[in-house]
Structures are given as structure tokens and as C-alpha cells.
Image (cartoon, rainbow, N blue to C red):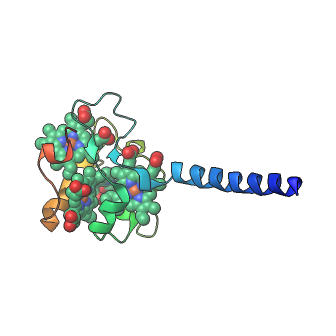
Amino acid sequence: MKQNNIFTYTVIFSIFLLIGTIAAFSQEDIENVHDSAFKKLTRPAVAFFHDIHNDKAAIEECNVCHHMFEGKKRVEDDDSIGMECSECHYKEPVSSIPDLIRAYHLQCSGCHLKQKAGPVLCGECHRRE
Ligand code: HEC
Ligand code: HEC
Ligand code: HEC
Ligand code: HEC
């Protein structure tokens, strides 16, 4: 009986631990964009509730944002999930690859402008809490 209880508790504890671990690595928890290339932000952090945003905006494909290129050619059936934008976009532009800040602004505000939905003013994205 006692042995059984210990076993049950161990199993339950392990399940909680596993769920916790998965949650910690999930994009559900993302509330801000914070690329590690920006060591110190000069503007307030950018509000971005990853999954809620993408549901509301009805974006079907992850690679609309997490895109993958082969040279200058976009690979439609591949993505760069798990990579930061700064792994390919740097402080300065490299030929036709926009610099990091421009890459973010072009992608985020670019779509908002095109769809006439979503913020385009600095303070609407860089929100003071
Ligand atoms: C509107 C653009 C956009 C779309 C669409 C999008 N993402 Fe993201 N995703 C981002 C941004 C921006 C980040 C945060 C990057 C940062 O802070 O460095 C991110 C982060 C992530 C991360 C976390 C990486 C980490 O280091 O924590 C994962 C995982 C992820 N996205 C997966 C997905 C998946 C899966 C989909 C499709 C279901 C998707 N994304 C769709 C923009 C997007
Ligand atoms: C695997 C590398 C890679 C990653 C990761 C990546 N990009 Fe790019 N991106 C490129 C390349 C290469 C180009 C330029 C293609 C060309 O030469 O025209 C580009 C072009 C762009 C452009 C301009 C053309 C277009 O498609 O709109 C924007 C905006 C952009 N990237 C934003 C982002 C953002 C924001 C992220 C992160 C969510 C990101 N990129 C992640 C490689 C990458
Ligand atoms: C492919 C199109 C697309 C891209 C790319 C995109 N957005 Fe949006 N975004 C939308 C749409 C559409 C809405 C309006 C959704 C609604 O509320 O109906 C929106 C709304 C928002 C809002 C207001 C809703 C809220 O959560 O308060 C914020 C903030 C936002 N976007 C930030 C970003 C950031 C930051 C990025 C880049 C990392 C980004 N978006 C990239 C389409 C896009
Ligand atoms: C649609 C959302 C959006 C709008 C509008 C926007 N930004 Fe950004 N901006 C971003 C994102 C996303 C990043 C990347 C933030 C990160 O990784 O920490 C960024 C990064 C930056 C950075 C580099 C990081 C820092 O804090 O030093 C600066 C500077 C900046 N933006 C200034 C501006 C200015 C000025 C405006 C208005 C002209 C503006 N942004 C409008 C989304 C936006």
C-alpha cells in the first residue's frame, strides 16, 4: 500500500515536471519580442503575445515570419523556427538583407500597413507598461 502511494506520487510529480518543462519552452508564453542581439533596449520592449497575435491576425503559415532563404530565393516549404532573426539579420545590412531593426519594422509594420490592421506608431508597439 505504502509502496503504491509513493509510486503514484512519483508518477504525478513527474507529469507536472514534464508539463512545466514543455510550457517553459513554448511560444505560448511569449509576451514581448526580445532579440538577444539587442543588448540594451533604447525603446520600451515590444508587446507581442505570440499565439494570441497570430490567431487574431489569422496567419496560417509560421514561415510568413520565420522565413527561410537559399541565397536570395525564399524556400516556401521550409522555415526558420527556433532561430532568432538576428542569426541572419545583422546590425548593418548585407547587400539585399535588411539590417535587424529594419527587418523587424518591415515585417511587423509592413504587414500592418498592407492589411490596414495592427499598430504602426512607435508607442503602440514599444509600449511603456
Ligand atoms: C507574426 C510573425 C510570427 C509568426 C506568424 C510566427 N512567429 Fe514564432 N516568433 C515570432 C517572433 C517575433 C518571435 C520572438 C523572437 C525573439 O524574441 O527573439 C517568435 C518566437 C518563436 C519561438 C520561440 C523561440 C525562442 O527562442 O523562444 C518559437 C518556438 C516560435 N516562434 C514558433 C512559431 C510557430 C510554430 C509558428 C507557427 C504556428 C510561429 N512561430 C509563427 C514571430 C512569429
Ligand atoms: C535563415 C536566415 C533568416 C532568418 C532566421 C530570418 N531571415 Fe529575414 N531574410 C533573410 C534573407 C537572406 C533575406 C534577404 C533575401 C534577399 O536577398 O532579398 C531576408 C529578408 C527579409 C526581409 C525583407 C524581404 C521580405 O521578405 O520581406 C524582411 C522584412 C525580413 N527578412 C525580416 C525577418 C524577420 C523579422 C525575421 C525573424 C522573425 C527574419 N527575417 C528571420 C534571412 C533570414
Ligand atoms: C502577416 C501579417 C502580420 C505580421 C507579419 C505581423 N502582424 Fe501584428 N497584427 C496583424 C493583424 C492583422 C493585426 C490585427 C489583429 C486584430 O486585432 O484583429 C495585428 C495586431 C497587432 C498588435 C495589436 C494587437 C495586440 O496584441 O495588442 C500588435 C501589438 C502587433 N500586431 C504586433 C506585431 C509585431 C511586433 C509584429 C512583428 C514581430 C507583427 N505584429 C507582425 C498582422 C500582422
Ligand atoms: C509594429 C510594431 C513596431 C512599430 C510600429 C515600431 N517598432 Fe521598433 N521594433 C519593433 C520590434 C519587433 C523590434 C525588435 C525588438 C527587440 O527584439 O527587442 C523593434 C526594435 C526597435 C529598435 C531597436 C531596439 C531598441 O529598443 O533599441 C529601435 C531603436 C526601434 N525599434 C525604434 C522604433 C521607432 C523610433 C519607431 C517609430 C518610428 C518604431 N520602432 C516602431 C516593432 C515595432
Q: Name the residue at the front extreme.
A: 1
Quadrant containing the N terminus is: bottom right
Above/below status of 92 relative to 111: above
Depth check: 90 or 9 in front? Answer: 9
Give the side of residue 108 with respect to residue 54, left or right.
left
Residue lying at the far top in this picture: please name it. 40
Residue 85 placement (x, y as % from top left): 38, 47
Number of marks drawn:
0
In the rendered image, is residue 74 in sight?
Answer: no
| Image location (x, y in percent) of residue 39 | 35, 29
Residue located 33% across and 33% down the image: 38
Residue 115 relative to residue 90: left or right: left
Using the rendered view, name the quadrant where residue 102 is placed. Answer: top left
The quarter of the image holding the C terminus is top left
Measuring 29% from the left and 71% from the top, which residue is drawn there?
58
**Residue, x 77% and y 57% (percent of image)?**
8
Asked if residue 42 can be seen in this view, the reply is yes
- Left or right of 69 in this view: 3: right
Percent x, y of residue 113: 13, 60
Quarter of the rendering containing residue 12: bottom right
Q: Is residue 55 above or below residue 23?
A: below
Residue closest to the eye, 26 or 106: 26
Measured as percent of width and height from the top left, residue 49 is found at 33, 54
